[in-house]
Image (cartoon, rainbow, N blue to C red):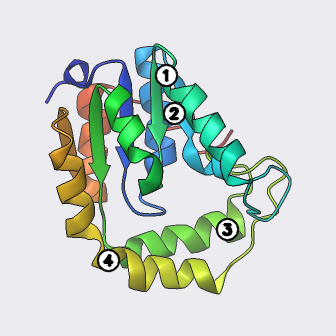
């Protein structure tokens, strides 16, 4: 599918550490839109992923989706209905949960200024996140795929890092790994 078929408001969904934030920045640069990382709406800057109050989180998200052009990465299923209502296309990323786990270790231990990191980056390894990546997320793959397909938006499904690399090449995207 050509990139233009996804329109000017693109959602990127998928499991943690699947490359959503990096893709969001690359796409936003290509189409002249602003990249938004839902994790940064949810969590307070200069913390170790401390959550914002729900009202503030929802307000930040809802203000961003009202913009004319955006690329937004992240899930947060409670906010997906309003995001689907404004989105013009969706990209669903998947890869092996072991590959996602390796990327989690790498980014947390060594990639302090990565795309999608919280300001002040006080990130640390968390057992809760390890469990989420290795145990919980793999069980949600089909549910997530069904939800995204049901939205009825133009959809690109990417099922491996090799497919994602081909998509970068096909669409002429440039990866920016750090901020």
Please report whichever mark, 3 or 4, sits nearer to the chain's N-terminal start: 3
Alpha-carbon span between mark 3 and mark 4: 21 Å
Comparing 53 with 110, the one in front is 53
From the image, tell me which residue sits under label 4.
Answer: 138
**Does 36 sit above or below residue 105?**
above
Q: Residues within 10 Å of mark 2 (few under 14, many from 20)?
A: many
- The quadrant of the image that shows the N terminus is top left
Decide: marks 1, 2 in contact (CB < 8 A)? yes
- SS of the residue under disc 1: helix
Decide: marks 3, 4 in contact (CB < 8 A)? no
Residue 68 point in image, percent of width and height: 46, 13
Please report whichever mark, 4 or 1, sits nearer to the chain's N-terminal start: 1
Residue 91 appears in view: yes
Residue 42 point in image, percent of width and height: 65, 51
Please report whichever mark, 2 or 4, sits nearer to the chain's N-terminal start: 2
From the image, tell me which residue sits under label 3.
Answer: 108
């Amino acid at each position: 599918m050509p990139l233009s078929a996804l329109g000017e408001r693109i959602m990127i969904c998928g499991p943690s550490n699947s490359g959503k934030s990096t893709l969001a920045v690359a796409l936003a640069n290509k189409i002249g839109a602003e990249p938004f990382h839902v994790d940064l709406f949810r969590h307070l800057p200069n913390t170790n992923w401390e959550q914002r109050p729900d009202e503030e989180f929802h307000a930040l998200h809802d203000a961003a989706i009202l913009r004319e052009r955006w690329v937004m990465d992240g899930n947060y299923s409670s906010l997906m209905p309003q995001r689907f209502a404004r989105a013009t296309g969706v990209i669903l990323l998947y890869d092996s949960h072991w590959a996602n786990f390796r990327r989690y270790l790498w980014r947390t231990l060594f990639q302090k200024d990565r795309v999608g990191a919280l300001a002040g980056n006080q990130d640390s390894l968390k057992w809760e996140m390890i469990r989420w990546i290795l145990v919980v997320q793999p069980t949600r793959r089909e549910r997530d795929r069904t939800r995204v397909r049901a939205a009825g938006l133009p959809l690109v499904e990417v099922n491996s890092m090799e497919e994602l690399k081909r998509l970068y090449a096909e669409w002429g995207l440039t990866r920016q790994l750090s901020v």
